[in-house]
Amino acid sequence: MKLLKLILFAAILGLSYDVSAQIHVDLKGKLNDQLNDRANKHVDNAIDKGLDAIEEGVANSVNNDNNDGDNNDDEDSESENKSKKAKDSDRSGSTDQEETVKPVQDKVSILSSTKYDFVPGDKVLFFEDFSQDAVGDFPALWTTNGSGEVKTVNIAPGNWLHMNTEDAVYAMTKEIPLPENFIFECDVITAPKDGDDIFDFSISFFHANDDYRIDDLFPGDNGFKMGIENGRWWVQSYSNEKDGKDGESTLSPVGVNELHHIIAWVQKGRIRIYHSGQKVIDLPTFLYTPINYNHLRFSLWSMVGRPYVTNIRITTAGADTRSKLLTEGKLISYGIYFDVNKDAVKAESFGALNDIAKILKENPEVRIKIVGHTDSDGADASNLDLSKRRGASVKNELVKTFGIDASRLESDGKGESVPIAPNDTPSNKSLNRRVEFIKL
């Protein structure tokens, strides 16, 4: 057994030398060492898994000899369970245009967490859901040094950009000038490469002129990267003039083949990342200032990530909820989340609803009407009904979760009848999908 382990260890060690030699790159300043450290983590994990597999295999062989085949029943049962799961997945029902991925369990609507303090802004700066792109095409507003295509999937509605090339980047072709304070959100399906059980990818914001290379590891003058590696969140900031910084999360593990809503809140030098109803990273003085980012990019620097992304949204940060509701008499919120064509309030809505509830508790004489609005997609009657149900759901959450007296709340829905922007582009449609709080 020891001889077999030594042989395998030597073979894997030789492979790790080749791998690390291939990915060693010249970074800016000390980021060279940081990248190699991440690569070495992957190699160490591979070595551990290989040795563990040998020990487990030898142990199972000995146990089988000593226990007259008792373990075979467990292995047969496990094999039958895997076969059943595969058949159940095949019955999930995908079309020729759908990509079959593992179904996702429904989550609770609201999470009462004091650390979930995210409140969205009231102005949409950018939105992308690939609805203007044909399934099977690469999206018109993006570029890549690899390949990818717009697809539909069996576990969620809408169009998704499938990033399916290793060591590739996917970048917006137009500049998105961003203020010092902004919020980034997107939906991601963490699909790994076939046969892998880990998932890596990253998202970058940076400042660059028109002559930058999209495939630079750290493009532009300065920026930050956040991502998932071995199921955990990490973040890096970098600058041409200063050493890089690393931050890492120990909260909110990220599973593979699951749908995740990601939020990053930038406030000058501070960055907060939210996932699965938790604030997983909060670094108060981490980013290099002044903030003048103008580009967005997704990156696959490892061989294990094949993500799907959609509903990419960037908004201003920190709506003045109190002033808009009490002084102006109306607050438009883009922070009340629903699934497509559904009325259940999602967990990410906690911060926005908590802000409304605080105002109502501090001002017991105030009454409000909650009005749902939709874009123009779908039938008029269906949109009207959906908007009314969403308004009622928000009212119910304020009563049930936040303890607001129901007599102080009214709800309604206007469907698509009161747009605040033309329903001609994905970005404009996202402006019309909103919840309004009106002081009575």
Image (tube, helix red, strand yellow):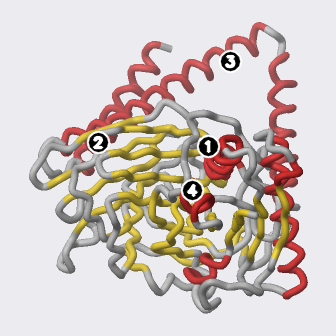
Reading the image, the residue beneath label 3 is: 61
Q: Quadrant of residue 70?
A: top right
Q: Residue 281: percent from the left, percent from the top?
A: 45, 38
Task: Decide which of tag 4 and tag 1 comes sooner along the chain.
Answer: 1
Reading the image, the residue beneath label 2 is: 286
Asked if labels 2 and 4 touch by Cβ distance under 8 angstroms, the answer is no
Q: Residues within 10 Å of mark 4 (few under 14, many from 20)?
A: many
Q: Alpha carbon of mark 2 to alpha carbon of mark 1: how far?
A: 27 Å
The outermost residue toward the left is: 241
**Under tag 4, what secondary structure?**
helix
Asked if labels 3 and 1 touch by Cβ distance under 8 angstroms, the answer is no
Q: Alpha carbon of mark 1 to alpha carbon of mark 3: how far?
A: 31 Å
**Under tag 3, what secondary structure?**
helix
Q: Residues within 10 Å of mark 1 (few under 14, many from 20)?
A: some
Above or below, 12 relative to 176: above
- Horizontally, is 42 left or right of 427 in the view? left
Task: Decide which of tag 2 and tag 3 comes sooner along the chain.
Answer: 3
Q: Amino acid at mark 1?
A: Gly
Number of the front mark, 1 or 3: 1
Number of the front mark, 3 or 4: 4
Q: Residue 355: percent from the left, percent from the top?
A: 62, 48
Above or below, 250 relative to 174: above
Asked if labels 1 and 4 touch by Cβ distance under 8 angstroms, the answer is no
Q: Alpha carbon of mark 4 to alpha carbon of mark 1: how far?
A: 34 Å
Q: Residue 50: percent from the left, percent from the top?
A: 49, 29
Q: Residue 171: percent from the left, percent from the top?
A: 38, 72
Reading the image, the residue beneath label 1 is: 255
Number of the front mark, 2 or 3: 2
Of 64 and 126, nearer the camera is: 126
Reading the image, the residue beneath label 4 is: 321
